[in-house]
Image (cartoon, helix red, strand yellow):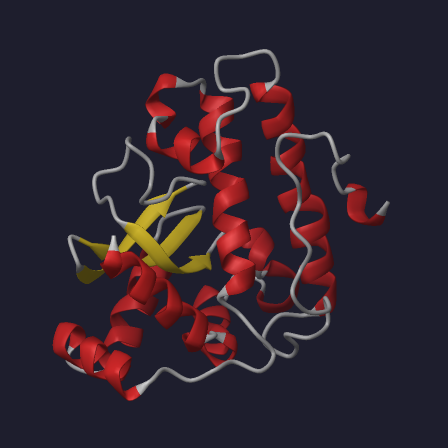
Amino acid sequence: MLFGVQAVDAQFKLPALPYSTSALEPAIDKQTMEIHHGKHHNAYVTALNAAVKGSSAEGKSLSELLGDVSKYPTVIRNNAGGHYNHSLFWLVMSPKPKPASAAFLKQMDATFGSMDQFKKAFADSAAKRFGSGWAWLMVQNGKLKISSTPNQDNPLMDVVAEKGTPILALDVWEHAYYLKYQNKRPDYISAWWTIVNWGEVERRYNEAIKK
């Protein structure tokens, strides 16, 4: 059983990575990916399954839990967030990232001034997140917006101030980068841009603006 993947009858399951654990090197090293996906993400899934079993949350989808997370115990908030956030994180990275289309770049320019200015603002949000948390690019009322959340919160939750549909996520918990970068979070953020899969980000943007 690779990395303790959940049994088939579990409500929530650890998704397989869409690439090998070494595929994102040198930006993210193999050992970090093995621990991050196989240990940390799997722990969120395991704890979430235990927390929902026999409760009013049993049978609810992940999006349903997040949208009404204020109704549930903190253990569900933390672990449902951890499961969703990481599941998105793996998918917006790739060893062979697809570039953004001219149309999406035009939208980024209109919102942030340029892609470079967006990256600077996003990196600043990620670097300044105190302690553990996430930086997001999301669609809010049809428009692109950068936000940041603590711990495993995300913009889909009814408890956060800035709500929206996440299309890009960056994990700035220390376990995401400490083995390779130690306390140099800005270096991790800088390297991460080389593996951002803009094709996937754009696909999620197009889905979000249709809602």
Depicted 25 relative to depicted 34: above or below: below
The total of numbered circles placed on residues is: 0
Is 13 on the left-hand or right-hand side of 84?
A: right
Which residue shows up at 50% across the image and 77% down it?
191
Rendering coords of residue 66 (x, y %): 39, 34
Rendering coords of residue 85 (x, y %): 48, 48
Depicted 158 relative to depicted 125: above or below: above
Which residue shows up at 30% across the image and 66% down it?
206
In this view, the residue in front, 157 or 210, is 210
The image quadrant that residue 59 belongs to is: top right
Rendering coords of residue 137 (x, y %): 31, 61
In this view, the residue in front, 206 or 1, is 206
Is 36 on the left-hand or right-hand side of 102?
A: right
Furthest residue toward bottom: 102
Depicted 97 relative to depicted 7: above or below: below
Is 27 on the left-hand or right-hand side of 114?
A: right
- Can residue 74 be seen in this snapshot? yes
Q: Quadrant of the N terminus?
A: top right
